[in-house]
Amino acid sequence: MTSVFTMVVPQWQGAAAGTGPYHGAQAIVRMLGADRIDVQVPVHEQSVAKKEEGIWYEYEIAEHLKNALASLEASKPQRILTIGGDCASDIAAISYLNRLYGGDLTVLWLDAHADLNTPESSPSNKFHGMPLRLLLGEGAPGLLEMLPSTLEPGQVVFTGLRELDHAERQYIVANGIPNVPTCHDCASMLGNVVAKTGRKHIYMHLDLDVIDPTDFDAVSCPTPGGFWFDDLLTEIAHLGKAFPIVGSAVTEYQPKDDENAVKVQRVLQALGDAMR
């Protein structure tokens, strides 16, 4: 396997609720070490709040997407680790890899939230609730036209999902997108569901709020329920043994204390092992 291209996208504007995700991404950079980073997308720590196409800070988000895609097109990696930033930090990587592998890609969305809103359906107009719907070909035209490829609903598998808006529930039901339960003995179940997509390559989008906040709460949107931390590591290891993991992302980390920081380091190690 080729080496993993590590891209940092410390975007916070998608969450539009302070710069916590920005500092989370920078904290992860320090954990990994500067020599492990291939590119860091420039992100302003201060931005003017304005809404375009029904999205707060869209003008900044579009710039991040353009720069991330330019870096990927220049380097042409075959495997990518994205360090976010908010939950929309890895749309460039997913769209790029989906084109690279000709649609032979399953996107495993490990997240408490579906991120399936459009600007019209979003209660908040915050983009971190919209990235997957954009990747599925619906959303702000100015962002959609920048994507090198879009997904089909059959390429998506959820796990850890537990807090949805009504429009998101409707979309999931209408398109039959599976949501695999989180439980101590569910690693093989998740692998079986992923295998049924019939696609060879796997991308793991990991929003750390997929973990139960009693076990890890250094996130933008802690949500009751979800994975126990050790069970999440088991799932990642199982998937890494069963499938070629060509991409992953760690998003929505907001530094809080040393105990949580150690857990983030363990997640990074687990993802690194899974992508070998």
Image (tube, rainbow, N blue to C red):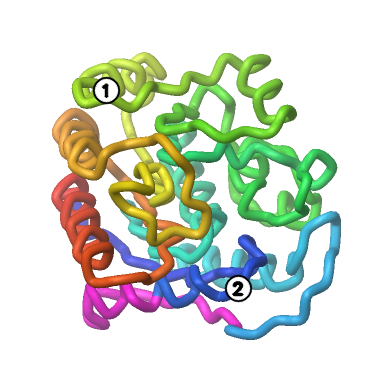
Q: Position of residue 238 (x, y in %)?
A: 17, 32
Front of the two marks 1 and 2:
2
Q: Secondary structure at mark 1?
A: helix
30 on left or right of 66? left
* Numbered mark located on residue 191 in the image: 1
Would residue 105 be seen by someone viewing this image from the given angle?
no
What residue appears at the point 23 percent right and 71 percent down from the top-left corner?
Answer: 258
Q: Which residues are magenta?
A: 26-44
User: Is 196 or 96 nearer to us in this picture?
Assistant: 196
* Numbered mark located on residue 18 in the image: 2
Q: Position of residue 167 (x, y in %)?
A: 74, 29
**Quarter holding residue 181:** top left
What residue appears at the point 51 percent right and 59 percent down from the top-left corner?
Answer: 220
- 43 drawn magenta: yes
Ranked by sequence position, the earlier of labels 1 and 2 is: 2
What residue appears at the point 53 percent right and 47 percent down from the top-left corner?
Answer: 95
